[in-house]
Image (tube, grey):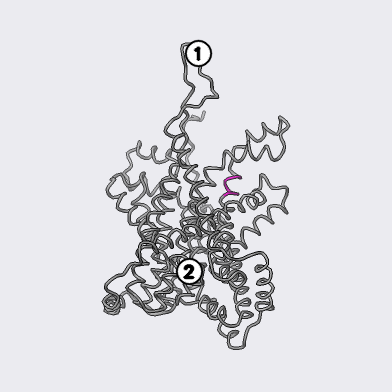
């Protein structure tokens, strides 16, 4: 009789060992996709025609530039305060516009809320094409209609941000607990009641955190929007660079950096506070029994929530008042300017000279984005791992690593591009290196968050079995966080593609420089170039979506 507790021995085969299970098609597809992206990235890096030794060779150019720029000059206190407030007003109003518009778009795009497949497709279409056009491109179009001032910047930042905020908001809606919503529906609640009572309370923290994250991005974007007449600190920086007053330009760049750094720290602290699990204060009891549950105690969390809410109201009100004071466009002017701009921009047309340059320029833009993403990958992952609490127990190492990520993230890509233009000259190399340095901060922070959010069960099991810290990371932490890391890397490439278009306007290579020249010249050609940029980003977006599916 066979002992059921003992597994039967494997039966030997005369033909040799049993064949191994073939790898799944998804694994092969993921390997092929990863190899293709790696080869394309290395090819893009080689196309930059720049070696690390050239940093040493070109360093005298940097030192001579700063010698000519010394001493650093700062604008007057009144001008700094006025322009800083205007910059913040543009960012806050643009982000607020995106926050409002993202709600209906996300409701259409969410599978568990939308009215059908057509609704989901419409919501995703709106989200995709709102983020497909770079904000600088939208600012150029709105400036043609509305003229210079903060309003084109607000509209550009708001419409472009809808794509990201609505996408994250729709994903949060799809992950809600359906229990409260079903209970409300069973009680006879309508769709509006289901949303405000069953969905909105669950997704509000995630929505606010996404809006805060987008405001960080918009603040850095506002620096380069000044180059098309939006106003604020970016406009002043453009003025000083145009007059070759480099000492004053460095002063404005330092103010921008400090502003972005403070904004990044405050925004990160608010996001952590909002996304932290809520602690229930419980029901207080008295000698007569439980206290009235309708009387909520003033806990520290409730006090912080009220302070945050009223501070947000004050900031929004001040930003709207500041932006309204600078906006001069009336309804009559808008429609008159819109008709005039439409006549100048439509139909799209390309000259024979431009037709021969547009293909190489679009390819160069993709190469810049690929090279920047690949150059960011290794340092971002290293700093992200060192910043994760569940991997690096030493607080000093975590603090230093996070400090590096925050500092790098706070530098606007415009300032990085100008610095690398000094070192390497105008072209794709400067744009790729600027995006690569900026990408380290973004990808490193996302990597740290993903590593910290892995389920703790497998890590604890390995530690209980006596595994070392490196074994726990290799066997549990890294494999569990890999899907999120892949998704974040594609997000960085998507961001770098739009950044390559933007930095081309300040000499970073690619299609952006052609857009800037067309904007000040042939508007019909600018429209054709805009359509080419939209087509490129759409194609890349769908290719990236297919690549993400391969890694799931």
Residue 369 shows in this picture: no
Q: Which mark is residue 226?
A: 2
Q: Secondary structure at mark 1?
A: strand
Q: Nearer the viewer, residue 30 or 206?
A: 206
User: Quick check: 344 above or below 183?
Assistant: below
Q: Residue 189: percent from the left, percent from the top?
A: 71, 34
Residue at the extreme bottom: 352
Determine which quarter of the picture holds residue 242: bottom left
Which is closer to the viewer, label 1 or label 2?
2
Q: Residue at x 50, y 13 (%)?
A: 289
Q: Nearer the viewer, residue 31 or 440?
A: 440
Q: Residues within 10 Å of mark 1 (few under 14, many from 20)?
A: few
Question: Range of the magenta residues?
Answer: 169-173
Q: Secondary structure at mark 2?
A: helix
Q: Residue at x 43, y 61 (%)?
A: 82
Question: Magenta stretch: residue 394 in it?
Answer: no
Q: Which mark is residue 289?
A: 1
């Amino acid at each position: 009789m066979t002992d059921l507790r003992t597994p039967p021995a494997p039966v030997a085969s005369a033909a040799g060992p049993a064949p191994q299970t073939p790898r799944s098609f998804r694994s092969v597809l993921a390997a092929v996709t990863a190899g293709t992206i790696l080869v394309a990235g290395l090819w893009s890096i080689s196309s930059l025609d720049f070696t690390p030794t050239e940093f040493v060779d070109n360093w005298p150019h940097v030192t001579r530039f700063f010698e000519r720029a010394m001493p650093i000059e700062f604008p007057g206190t009144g001008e700094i305060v006025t322009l800083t407030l205007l910059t913040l007003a543009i960012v806050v109003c643009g982000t607020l516009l995106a926050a409002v518009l993202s709600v209906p778009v996300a409701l259409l795009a969410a599978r568990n809320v939308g009215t059908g497949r057509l609704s989901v497709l419409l919501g995703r279409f709106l989200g995709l094409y709102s983020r497909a056009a770079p904000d600088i491109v939208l600012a150029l179009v709105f400036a043609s209609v509305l003229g210079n001032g903060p309003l084109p910047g607000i509209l550009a930042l708001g419409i472009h941000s809808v794509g990201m905020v609505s996408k994250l908001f729709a994903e949060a809606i799809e992950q809600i607990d359906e229990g409260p919503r079903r209970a409300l529906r069973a009680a006879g609640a309508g769709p509006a009641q289901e949303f405000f009572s069953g969905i909105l309370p669950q997704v509000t923290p995630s929505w606010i955190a996404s809006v805060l994250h987008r405001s960080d991005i918009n603040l850095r974007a506002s620096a380069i929007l000044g180059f098309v007449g939006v106003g604020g600190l970016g406009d002043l920086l453009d003025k000083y660079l145009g007059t070759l007053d480099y000492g004053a330009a460095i002063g404005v760049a330092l103010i921008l950096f400090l502003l972005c750094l403070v904004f990044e720290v405050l925004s990160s602290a608010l996001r952590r506070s909002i996304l932290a699990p809520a602690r229930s204060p419980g029901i207080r009891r008295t000698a007569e029994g439980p206290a009235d549950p309708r009387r909520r105690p003033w806990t520290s969390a409730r006090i912080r929530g009220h302070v945050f809410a009223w501070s947000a109201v004050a900031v929004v009100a001040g930003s709207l008042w500041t932006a309204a004071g600078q906006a001069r466009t009336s309804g009559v002017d808008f429609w008159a300017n819109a008709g005039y701009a439409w006549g100048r921009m439509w139909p799209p047309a390309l000259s024979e000279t431009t037709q021969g340059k547009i293909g190489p320029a679009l390819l160069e833009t993709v190469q810049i984005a690929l090279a920047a993403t690949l150059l960011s990958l290794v340092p971002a992952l290293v700093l992200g791992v060192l910043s994760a609490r569940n991997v690096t127990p030493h607080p000093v190492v975590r603090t230093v690593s996070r400090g590096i990520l925050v500092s790098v993230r706070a530098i606007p890509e415009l300032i990085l591009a100008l610095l690398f233009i000094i070192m390497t000259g105008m072209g794709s190399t400067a744009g790729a290196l600027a995006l690569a340095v900026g990408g380290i901060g973004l990808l490193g922070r996302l990597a740290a968050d993903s590593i910290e959010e892995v389920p703790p069960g497998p890590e604890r099991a390995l530690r209980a079995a006596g595994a070392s810290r490196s074994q726990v990371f290799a066997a549990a932490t890294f494999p569990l966080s890999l899907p999120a890391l892949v998704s974040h890397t594609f997000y960085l490439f998507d961001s770098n593609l739009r950044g390559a278009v933007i930095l081309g306007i300040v000499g970073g290579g690619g299609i952006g420089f052609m857009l800037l020249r067309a904007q000040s010249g042939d508007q019909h050609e600018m429209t054709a170039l805009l359509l080419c940029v939209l087509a490129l980003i759409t194609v890349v977006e769908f290719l990236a979506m297919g690549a993400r599916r391969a890694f799931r």
